[in-house]
């Protein structure tokens, strides 16, 4: 760690080159208005997809290593993919402390989220003229904050989930071997999420544990 602002999570070394706003690292996938600057909490869909395709960390933008951490919701596990690109373990730990939603400092989504249409400038040639909201943004307005789970993957199991047209939807979770599943530190998950984590972790251990050794006496007695 090489920088720490008062009341802020220390910035990990991989993010040292990233710009900051209010002492917080600006993730690589963050949307930037040509005139208004960084829009924290808003992401560029093309960079989100590029992170998955090119195996980049969504926070620092650097290539991923041997271990990848993906933040996902219980419903993401059910649908088999998450829209969130992976991160380095240290960048994921930082995000879990710095992001208000991940850290549990927000118990509900904003009741009146600002529409992307209201962020557009008056320049008809500006790229912001084609910005749009994600389909579920208004649906989630005012709803309780989501539970998130940190899923650790081997980089060899990290792959994109694509739709029928080949467009990247996110990171595949179905049919993938999990190294570890943990709630976000400092955040109290719901009882349903806790049960899901325990059940999935038990399945992970069952699938990855070596088979028990055969009793030599039993082996010799077999025909």
Image: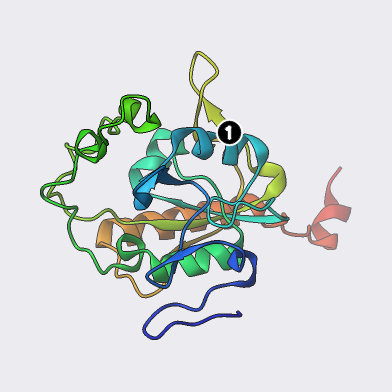
In the displayed image of the protein, which residue is found farthest to the bottom?
A: 6
Residue 101, by quadrant, is bottom left
Q: Residue at x 19, y 63 (%)?
A: 107
As drawn, is 156 to the left or to the right of 168? right
Please name whichever residue, 205 or 191, is drawn nearer the observer in this view of the structure. Answer: 191
Whether residue 172 is visible to the viewer of this picture, yes or no, is no
Q: Position of residue 98 (x, y in %)?
A: 40, 69
Q: Position of residue 113 (x, y in %)?
A: 17, 46
Q: Residue at x 51, y 62 (%)?
A: 19
Q: Position of residue 56 (x, y in %)?
A: 63, 47
- Number of numbered labels in the structure image: 1
Q: Residues within 10 Å of mark 1 (few under 14, many from 20)?
A: many
As drawn, is 8 to the left or to the right of 91? left
Q: Position of residue 116 (x, y in %)?
A: 25, 37
In the displayed image of the protein, which residue is found farthest to the top?
A: 165
Report the coloring of the rendering.
Answer: rainbow
As drawn, is 88 to the left or to the right of 74? right
Please name whichever residue, 77 or 195, is drawn nearer the observer in this view of the structure. Answer: 77
The local secondary structure at tag 1 comes to strand
Q: Which residue is mark 1?
A: 160
Is residue 25 positioned above or below 52 on the image? below
Quarter of the rendering occupied by the C terminus: top right
């Amino acid at each position: 760690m090489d920088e720490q602002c008062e009341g802020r999570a220390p910035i990990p070394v991989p993010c040292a080159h990233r710009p900051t706003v209010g002492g917080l690292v600006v993730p690589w996938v963050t949307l930037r208005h040509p005139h208004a600057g960084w829009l924290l909490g808003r992401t560029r869909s093309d960079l989100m997809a590029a992170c998955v395709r090119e195996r980049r960390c969504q926070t620092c933008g650097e290539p991923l290593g041997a271990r990848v951490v993906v933040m996902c919701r219980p419903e993401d596990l059910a649908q088999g993919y998450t829209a969130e690109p992976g991160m380095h373990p240290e960048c994921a730990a930082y995000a879990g402390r710095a992001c208000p939603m991940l850290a549990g400092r927000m118990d509900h989504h904003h009741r009146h989220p600002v529409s992307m249409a209201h962020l557009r400038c008056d320049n008809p040639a500006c790229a912001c003229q084609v910005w749009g909201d994600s389909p579920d943004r208004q649906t989630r307005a005012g709803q309780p904050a989501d539970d998130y789970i940190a899923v650790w993957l081997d980089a060899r199991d990290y792959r994109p989930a694509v739709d029928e047209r080949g467009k990247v939807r996110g990171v595949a979770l179905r049919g993938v071997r999990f190294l570890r599943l943990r709630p976000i530190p400092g955040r109290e998950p719901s009882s349903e999420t806790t049960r899901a984590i325990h059940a999935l972790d038990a399945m992970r251990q069952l699938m990855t544990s070596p088979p028990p050794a055969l009793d030599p006496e039993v082996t010799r007695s077999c025909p």
